[in-house]
Image: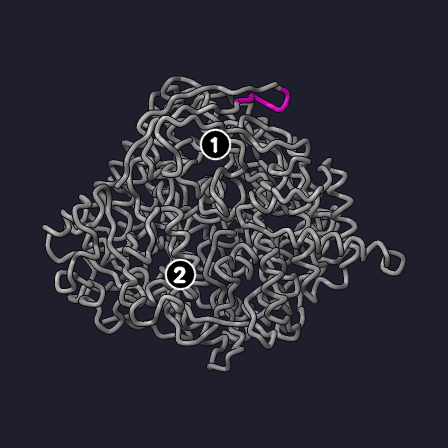
Amino acid sequence: MIKFREGTPITESAVPPGPMDRKWVDYRSKCRLVSPANKQRLTVIVVGAGLAGASAAATLAQLGYNVKVFVYHDSPRRAHSIAAQGGINAAKNYQGDGDSIYRLFYDTIKGGDYRSREANVWRLAEVSANIIDQSVALGVPFAREYGGLLANRSFGGVQVQRTFYARGQTGQQLLLGAYSAMMRWVDRKKIEYFPYHEMLDVVLIDGKARGVIVRNLLTGELKRYSGHAVVLATGGYSNVFYLSTNAMNSNVTAAWRAHKRGAYFANPAFTQIHPTCLPAEGKYQSKLTLMSESLRNDGRVWVPKEEADVERVRSGRIKPADIPEEKRDYFLERMYPAFGNLVPRDVAARAIKKMCDAGFSVIPEGDAVFLDFKDAIARLGRDVIDQRYGNLFEMYEKITGESPWDTPMKIYPAPHYTMGGLWVDYKLQTNVPGLFAIGECNFSDHGANRLGASALMQGLADGYFVLPYTIGDYLADEIRTPLPDTQAPAFDQAEKEVRSLMEKIYQIGGNTSVDELHRTFGRIMWDYCGISRTAEGLQKAYGMVCDIEERFWKDVKVPGKLDEKNSELEKAQRLLDFIQLGKLMIIDAFHRNESCGGHFREEYQTPEGEPLRNDEEYAYAAAWEYTGTDEPVLHKEPLQFEVVKPSVRSYK
Amino acid sequence: MSKTINLTLKVWRQSGPNDKGGFETYSLQNVSTRMSFLEMLDVLNQQLIAEGKRPVEFEHDCREGICGACSLVINGRPHGPNYRTTTCQLHMRHFKDGETIYIEPFRADAFPVVKDLIVDRSAFDRIMAAGGYISVNTGSPQDANNIPVPKPKADKAFDAAECIGCGACVAACPNASAMLFVAAKVSHLSLLPQGEPERERRVRRMIEAMDAEGFGHCTNTGACSIECPKAIPQEFINRLNREFLRASFITEITDD
């Protein structure tokens, strides 16, 4: 049974007064500062070193704070930001095509289906240009024109060219830039970094975040570190679905453990499904690989019209090319004649799922549709297509062994980004004083749907340009606070709880491996809380996930020892947190009786099958409070739209 | 269509840095040729867990060939038999039914084994900390377009910047030299105008750090570029040597 209570609304989100375009300027001018002498006495703990964490750590160290960085990887350079392909948006207007801070702000608010906080988004657009300057100064090799100036390209959902890119490896190059900035301060002893250390708890003293409990993944040792503030930069939770485009180790544990200590978790049901990924085939599949959105510029999505052809193509008796034009259903072009194959991500994903659910999947195990370049190759020639997509074709062939030059790609939607996350105010501070959340792990900027090339922008905006100011405003009150003693009772208590939970999991001694249970659980989340959702389905899923949780405690099996490198133990702890998050996602999806962005409730759609928002009742961020029971408390943060008037999106 | 193969795996098992370690033999049946190499190891681990044995520890994360976490020496070759391919992007269709596959960790004194197939590559981070950056503070840098970079130069810098820091170059080298890694990093930054002010200091400090970590010397075997999953070319090693030589001539002027 899905249960929740409604608590007091959130009335304080620290948004400064004044006109929208003055808020951040005024805030920066008026927020409190910490003198250089005092900064040296303050320690900030940063968890995670992706774009947000590494850029924050470098900047805080440069300001004079002592910084401790914890990552579970062997090196800070491995964070999943590295896998982002397409690009990063910035309102530079280098192309003179009418771009401005307002337009980037407007596109992001609209793209988020009017479920994000205007002041945060404005600030994001405002600092976007600085990110490009900063990254170039750090040596990030963005694409350039022959004149030596920076190149731009278009991205989905906007009418200007504002995306900066570094071949298909923009995330890698931006992360290496932030990582190098961070390593410079490691060399200067202002940053101490701890590879192979996973955060398992945040320690609160008198209600303020004062430290963390981490586990050394190589020795199993639990360790305590204290600081004057704690910054979580721990990424998203798409791996709740087991199969996603996220890296294998991406997890929600740091954010979830903070949630259990009192930090609200906002809009957990807002997850983004990317339409063009390699499909899951077979039980062994471990992850889903994204194929860039740009492919839909020239590729046509189709399935056979006749079930007999579906059957024959699945069994390999005929090739896709053998099916004549009149027997193909180019269903995106049929359903959305105005936008065709280039409908937004959520719309394309739902249409593809619909066709596969109706029995038109073109692969024998699992679901997939064709993405065909035959016509584009005929129209534009092989050279043009090779220039545009050659590297993607090569990657596809490397994985599948099939060449998109000869036969259409097989693709299916997959989870790849989570808009939801820890609730933060304008200062990126959670409701727990001294606990900050930046990058994908917070909920703040993308509302119910994120636009392409905006994740990199947000991570670096938070880390380079926002947090370093706002955290100073908090630390100004802490200059007389000595570095908290890690022998304090709160540290004892937190470590004891972490240890006892870990030992309890370790001692279950069941028969099911962590991966097997995660796969079963992820499938439930995908089927009932994925591309589309219904109240009935969510209720059913809630019961199923409760059963999974019960099964976890009875039947999970963790081999190896506690005091050694033990990947199964790491995964088991993360799985438990994912399961608990899964329950909250279902509750959140169930409570939101509307469709918006990535949250599609089948009961709430227009006669044409488009999402039907309900601004009267649901124009709020849902911030959930952990209660330790199956009845979380909902705190609503109302969203006011001063600048943009919410309207309906249509792509017909 | 997918088919299945049967394999014999000889996997390096080592319980910790101080353990001697050795090969264990496992038999794996009905491996789908559509699997990736790491998924094949996942299946092996599921089998080991079911048998009550300790699963094999190996590094992996993005499984898209970009994070550089995966490693492994497969049948004597870092990242396996395919050109320009990380282990995570290697698929089982490249192996034959009945084949015996040897799987070992990257081997180098500067990369001590942590457990089973995991090695400690933190030496790379220490080399980076010694100088693999441009010293610029966060704040208000000049407009990005105030620093024009000729496209061919930017492209060349990018070719070097593609390095994923996996360490295959070290594992491939008979001397366990880290020259290709350092060459990629030094070349990336020294090709760009932004990297100019620290050009000499950077190369000296990074080479010094590399030597301190115990990597071997480069004897130009070229194995590193062949095994590099991003095919970082040898010309960057030439460039590194030139940069180092150049820096050694003008040390006095730029020394800090």
Q: Give the quarter of the image for residue A239.
A: top left
B14 relative to A31, above or below = above
Q: Position of residue A2 (x, y in %)?
A: 26, 42
Residue B14 lies in the magenta stretch: yes
Q: Give the quarter of the image for residue A223.
A: top right
Mark seen at residue A450: 2
Q: In terms of secondary structure, where does tag 1 sit?
A: helix
Q: Are marks 1 and 2 on the same chain?
A: yes
Quadrant of the drawing holding the C terminus of chain B: bottom right
How busy is the neighbourhood of tag 1: few (under 14 within 10 Å), some, or many (20 plus)? some
Mark seen at residue A570: 1
The reply to whether the C-beta atoms of the residues labelled 1 and 2 are less than 8 Å apart is: no
Closest to the observer, A92 or A28? A92
Marked residue chain, label 1: A
How busy is the neighbourhood of tag 2: few (under 14 within 10 Å), some, or many (20 plus)? many
Question: What amino acid is at disc 2?
Answer: Arg
The reply to whether residue A111 is visible in this rendering is: yes
Q: Which residues are magenta?
A: B13-18
A332 relative to A508, above or below = below
Identified at 55% across, 40% down, the residue is A73
